[in-house]
Image (cartoon, rainbow, N blue to C red):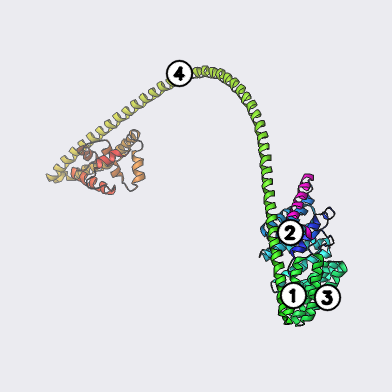
Amino acid sequence: MKTFPAWPGIFLSWCICLIMPSAVDAQTNSLAVPVSQPYLSSLHPDSAFNLIKEKMAAYIQEKDEAGQAHCLQQMGQLLFHLGSYTQAVDHLLQADKILRQQQPASLAANLNILGTVYYYNQQPTQARLQFDEALDIYKKQNNGSGIAETYGLIGHMFEKQLKYDSSYLFQRTALSYALSAGDTVVTAKIYENIGSIYEDKAMYDSAEYYFALSLHAYQHSGRVIEQIEVINNLGDVWSKRGNYSKGMVYARQAAALAILTGEKYQLQSAYRDIAQNFEGLKQYDSAYHYLEKSRQLVQSIYSLENSYQIGVLQTLYDTEKKNAQILSLNAARKANKVLSWASIIVLILIALLAAVIINHQKLRIRNEKAINLTRSKVYETEKGLMESELKRQQLEENSLKEQLDLKSRQLSSHLLHLIQKNEVMEELKQGLATIIRDDKRDQKKQIRQLLQQINVSFTQDSYWEEFRLIFDKVHPSFVTSLQQKYAGLTAGEMRLMTLIKMNLSSGDMSTLLGVTPDSLRVQRYRLKKKLNLGQDDSLTSFVQAVS
């Protein structure tokens, strides 16, 4: 089973190659790794990172955003293969932001790389989103190689998830696009992917067939490092079949090519396969010998990779620190410049403000003098008007008092007249009652008629209506207020309450109402109950409180 991206050694060679001026403007292709330059394997990732940063600085100086995006993409790939996934994603997203505005084709390639990083960071859903977007871009451009590459990445992701049917479907689709595009490198990679699926499913004949096709395509394209990987896979297939001798042939061939190209990672893999084949042949001493050589190479590789990673991260840290210092100095310089100009502007504004304030104060003093003079005149005028208004109000108040006194006198006079009238009528009533008790039959009929007329006179309301009109003028809201609060009061009860409001004595009230003092007490008691007054509450106090 093979790894998802190219091995670190392969990638670093490719990465350095991309730094070279001749490759700056080339489209990034994760399946196409140039290996013809003999000096690539001798360069270190930290050196590669420094070279990329130098290129990045030059592109920034030239304001070449396409070049900046290309460098960011390379740095992201380098950080990914050194295991710094978070920083890799950060650089690739920066490249993504630039490429979205300029280069859709490069954007699709960047999306494929970003999707790969997401997948290795255990984010398959996010990875699939990147692959799908890249696929849409390639389809719009009718880019068969790009479509094939993207389908191959999606299929390989399904293979790693052990979803072989889906993986095979995508790889077959990718193969058809690669063959139509005539892209030998992509075709070789897809053949290798399909062979890996069959190897995982222990279908070794089919696996050998597709690995052989892949090897032939890589040989045709001159891709030596990829050939080593496929030769290793062919050796694994024969070893898994139990043919260790045949497996040994492929393993030694892979080791020879790895030594020739200086690929330590491929060499340790080949040594491991040779050891497994010697073990299958029961030659344990030789198996141990090659296993130890493989172990030593692994230790050397990972020690070297760790030092590379530390070097790259240190370079990144130093660069970011230097950038931060530069930004800080630039910000300080800009701030000082802004502060200087701001100080000058502030001084000018202060001078202008002082002049404006002085002129404003002079103008305000002149205006205040004029306003004070005007206010003085207005005050004298208003004072005269207020004095006139006060006199008028005093006259109106005196007139109202006189009218109220007149109405009070009229009301008192009217009450006195009523009392006198009722007293006379009461005397007549009592005299007539005495005559009736004397039992003089010849006079009884006439006297009864006269007594009936007198009783009718007590019930007439003409005097009461006149009294009500005068009372309402003296106490205008008294009757209305009572009627609103106590709608069930009768006319007789209203008369009683108006007499109480006049502060008349019980004797005068009984005379005016034409009832006996006992009847008056009964009426007062009933009125208190209707008004919901308690036994200890004063009816007179209640009535006087009504305004």
At mark 1, the secondary structure is helix
The x and y percentages for residue 126 are: 68, 63
Furthest residue toward left: 438
Labels 1 and 2 touching (C-beta < 8 A):
no
Query: Real-space Cα distance between discs 2 and 4?
Result: 96 Å
Type of amino acid under label 1: Asp
Q: Kindly identify which residue carries mark 4.
A: 384
Q: Are marks 2 and 4 in contact (CB under 8 Å)?
A: no
Is residue 174 among what the camera can see?
Answer: no
Give the alpha-carbon distance from disc 1 to disc 2, as whole Å.
29 Å
Q: Earlier in the sequence, mark 2 or mark 4?
A: 2
Residue mark closest to the camera, 1 vs 2: 1
Q: Is residue 302 left or right of residue 498?
A: right
Q: Give the prevailing secondary structure in the magenta stretch.
A: helix
Residues in magenta? 41-62
The answer to whether 431 is drawn above or below residue 190 in the figure is above
> What secondary structure is found at the residue carrying circle 2?
helix
Judge whether residue 35 can be spotted in this image: yes
Mark 4 burial class by Cα count in 10 Å: few <14, some 14-19, many 20+: few
